[in-house]
């Protein structure tokens, strides 16, 4: 540090702090050095020495984020086995990469606690029946409308420590990441790791960049949100605004003793209510710490009791929404539960913000004929250098398609094969309720690290998002992965085939669950993945999404005479396990639910 100070001091007499190479060094020092290394006055002097403020902001962003999306290996052997693949960058990004390599991994859809392991915590209202649509996945319009997108973004901004940050600026920085640099110069961009190809496709939004050595669409039309205003007018009739369409209780994702699971809010861009080709869904998925970890799962009981109490049908939809509004923005202060919406609950190692994107595909004259391309992405809140940014992150449990392709020489195939081998029992029906091969709720799979995951899960192109299509084009299986699966099946004496196993693995990826696994009869046993693309009388057809913001899809409200945002057949099926999990924790007998999943 003294050498750095000496170098900077030597630069000052001839004002050479404005030289780009020196500017980069100053920015790097300011970013990575602890505040105590320099008095505040010295840090301010160093910043002011960079006379082009715009250049400082841009370079600060580039140094901090320019290559943060290239996953590097960690100190552990497992992380090393999942290090940057061919073509990845060797540039060290000090803070983000060290956090990524050491952050705990949480499966976004499958918890670590099986149904048989759930203790009975009890409830103060044992005679209150649990209603899954009031206490687990809540979507009555009059209920969800009690919270605003602006309130959530304001809450995050208030926790940033940056007095100059606004919700509008944070929103713009977030969606600027879907475009190319320099953009706004406030954060990462889709071409930080590799230039999009072909170059001719940039103008039609059909080019691909690479992140973590996997394809990444760059740029995307959602970059237009970087100049949009969703806050000034939040009326349902404003297509640029976002409306809440669901509250989701994911107590089933609990990881005792450290946390109490995830609690989510789904927002949808209002344009999608009437325009099927102009949609953007955002889910804030907060992983909430256990307020009393010394008490284990019992420390989460106040949260569990809060959600159970919402099943009381004497509570009208608006009042239920007000209670949920306060829960998310204020927490349960009497039980030492802080606000659910908290920047630390969406950070590396905790929860996440996920998106399901399909914007402006019928509006932009630069595009080929629609439909264009659905994609699912993941983001993290990142506090650094006195401010908050929202940055792209790898999509968990979404191994890159190229790892499944025959002939691939990517060194990360070994890590993927180890994950498959180690989790074969879960793939065969040992997860969740652990009811065996015939139950789709009992299928489980997760990647052990971020290195094998792609940064988006593509629902539109099978060659980019369908792992089964990559593994067995024309039913010709990848011999390396096939041999590994076959050996595990033999050891377990399972009658399932290697294709059955990869089909099961596909259901656990975002693109599989949302699109490619629809009506999959190839899972083995009697299991069938729900066909949400067709729907039924109470679950409208839903290609790509698991919930619909469309006005034409609205269903009767659970309570009162209003309406409810519709859910997919797949969500209804998956709620079976979540309902049983919550009932067992509450001590409600029997800890079961009606079956809403198809079987052969």
Image (cartoon, grey):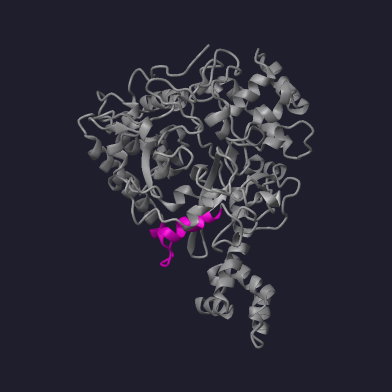
Q: Which residue lies furthest to the bottom in this view?
A: 13
Where's residue 399, x and y in %? 64, 36
Where residue 338 sits: x, y (%)? 35, 49
Q: Nearer the viewer, residue 386 or 460?
A: 460
Span colored in magenta: 157-177
Q: Does the magenta stretch include residue 366?
A: no
Residue 480 appears in the figure: yes
Q: Quadrant of the N terminus?
A: bottom right
The verdict on residue 170 being magenta is yes
Q: In which quarter of the image is residue 410?
A: top right
Of 275 and 208, the residue lying toward us: 275
Seen at 47% across and 29% down, the residue is 542
Q: Viewed as shown, does residue 103 lie left or right of 85?
A: left
Q: Is residue 140 left or right of residue 67?
A: left
> 301 or 373, which lies in front?
373
User: With 475 as the anchor, is 340 left or right in this view?
Assistant: left
């Amino acid at each position: 540090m003294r050498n750095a100070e000496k170098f900077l001091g030597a630069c000052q007499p001839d004002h050479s702090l404005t030289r780009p190479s020196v500017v980069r060094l100053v920015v790097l020092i300011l970013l990575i050095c602890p505040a105590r290394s320099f008095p505040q006055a010295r840090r301010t002097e160093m910043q002011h020495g960079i006379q082009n403020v715009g250049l400082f902001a841009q370079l600060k962003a580039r140094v901090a984020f320019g290559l943060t999306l290239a996953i590097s290996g960690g100190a552990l052997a497992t992380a090393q086995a999942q290090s940057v693949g061919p073509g990845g960058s060797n540039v060290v990004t000090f803070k983000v990469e060290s956090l990524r390599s050491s952050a705990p991994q949480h499966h976004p859809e499958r918890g670590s606690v099986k149904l048989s392991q759930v203790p009975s915590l009890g409830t103060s209202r044992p005679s209150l029946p649990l209603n899954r649509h009031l206490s687990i996945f809540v979507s009555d319009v009059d209920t969800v409308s009690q919270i605003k997108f602006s309130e959530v973004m304001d809450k995050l901004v208030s926790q940033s420590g940056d007095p100059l940050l606004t919700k509008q600026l944070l929103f713009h920085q977030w969606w600027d990441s879907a475009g190319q640099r320099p953009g706004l110069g406030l954060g990462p961009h889709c071409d930080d790791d590799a230039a999009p190809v072909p170059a001719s496709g940039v103008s039609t939004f059909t080019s691909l960049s690479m992140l973590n050595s996997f394809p990444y669409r760059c740029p995307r039309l959602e970059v237009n949100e970087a100049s949009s205003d969703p806050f000034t007018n939040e009326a349902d009739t404003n297509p640029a605004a976002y409306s809440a369409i669901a509250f989701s209780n994911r107590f089933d994702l609990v990881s005792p003793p450290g946390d109490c699971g995830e609690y989510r809010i789904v927002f949808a861009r209002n344009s999608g209510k009437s325009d099927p080709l102009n949609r953007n869904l955002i889910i804030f998925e907060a992983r909430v710490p256990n307020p009393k970890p010394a008490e284990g799962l019992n420390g989460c009981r106040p949260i569990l009791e809060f959600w159970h109490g919402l099943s009381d049908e004497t509570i009208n939809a608006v009042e239920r929404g007000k209670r949920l509004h306060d829960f998310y923005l204020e927490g349960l202060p009497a039980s030492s539960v802080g606000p659910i919406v908290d920047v630390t609950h969406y950070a590396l190692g905790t929860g996440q913000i996920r998106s399901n994107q399909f914007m402006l595909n019928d509006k932009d004259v630069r595009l080929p004929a629609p439909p264009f391309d659905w994609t699912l992405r993941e983001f993290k809140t990142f506090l650094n250098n006195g401010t908050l940014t929202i940055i792209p992150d790898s999509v968990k449990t979404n191994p890159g398609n190229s790892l499944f392709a025959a002939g691939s020489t990517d060194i990360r195939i070994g890590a993927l094969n180890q994950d498959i081998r180690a989790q074969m029992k879960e793939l065969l029906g040992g997860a969740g309720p652990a009811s065996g091969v015939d139950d789709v709720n009992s299928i489980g799979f997760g990647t052990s690290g971020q290195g094998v995951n792609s940064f988006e899960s593509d629902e539109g192109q099978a060659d980019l998002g369908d792992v089964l299509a990559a593994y067995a084009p024309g039913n010709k299986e990848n011999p390396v992965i096939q041999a590994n699966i076959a050996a595990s099946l033999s050891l377990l004496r399972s009658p399932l085939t290697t294709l059955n196993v990869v089909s099961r693995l596909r259901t656990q990826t975002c693109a599989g669950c949302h699109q490619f696994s629809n009506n999959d009869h190839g899972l083995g046993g009697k299991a069938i993945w729900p066909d949400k693309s067709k729907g039924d009388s109470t679950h409208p057809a839903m290609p790509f999404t698991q919930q619909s913001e469309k006005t034409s899809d609205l269903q009767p409200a659970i309570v009162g005479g209003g309406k409810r945002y519709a859910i997919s057949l797949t969500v209804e099926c998956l709620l079976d396990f979540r309902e049983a999990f919550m009932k067992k924790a509450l001590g409600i007998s029997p800890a079961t639910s009606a079956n809403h999943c198809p079987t052969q």
